[in-house]
Image: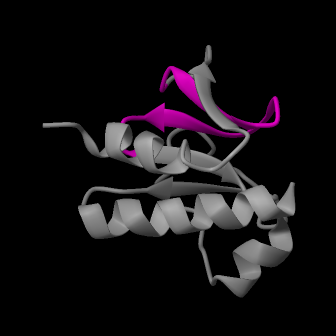
Amino acid sequence: MPSLKEKLIAEVEKIPGLRNMASPVAGGSALHYHDKEFAHFHNDNELDLRLTKKLIQQENLIHPPDSFVHPKRSPNSPWIELRFNTDAEMNEVVRLVKLGVTAI
């Protein structure tokens, strides 16, 4: 059975121009849209997504207070760490990745 990360990648790779590529970041891969990185995995259940400050606010997203990778990230950052541990959470991350693509 595929992992949630594998399912997420399979879903977002349906977006024309989006590819998952190897990355030196802890999670081992990053999402690129037309050759521009806009997200990377910290691990199998956490995606760091460049969504824009405006979209982060519109979606009422909050940076995880117990972040290990970016514990001091500014609230004005265009990046947001998204954790997913269930299919429903993974589907929400897929929706946010699609929003992120429109912001590039």
Give left or right: position of 23 versus 50.
Answer: left
Indicate yes or no whether the magenta region holds residue 4.
no
Is residue 26 in view from this perspective? yes
Indicate the position of residue 101 as horizontal and vertical percent values: 75, 56
Q: How is the image coloured?
A: one colour
Residue at image position (62%, 58%) is 97
| Quadrant (top left/top right/bottom left/bottom right) for the N terminus | top left
State the residue lying farthest toward the left: 1
Q: Name the residue nearer the viewer: 13 or 72.
A: 13
Number of marks present in the image shown: 0
Indicate yes or no whether the magenta region holds residue 32.
yes
**Region in magenta:** 27-45
Residue at image position (80%, 63%) is 102
Q: Is residue 99 above or below residue 34?
A: below
Indicate the position of residue 60 as horizontal and vertical percent values: 63, 84
Is residue 51 in view from this perspective? no
Answer with the quarter of the image where residue 83 lies. Answer: bottom left
Indicate the position of residue 41 as horizontal and vertical percent values: 52, 35
Give left or right: position of 72 versus 47.
Answer: right
Q: In this view, does 104 lie above or below 26?
A: below
Residue at image position (74%, 81%) is 57
Q: Is residue 95 above or below residue 70?
A: below
Residue at image position (51%, 57%) is 82
The rendered magenta stretch, by its main secondary structure, is classed as strand
| Quadrant (top left/top right/bottom left/bottom right) for the C terminus | bottom right
Give left or right: position of 3 versus 70.
Answer: left
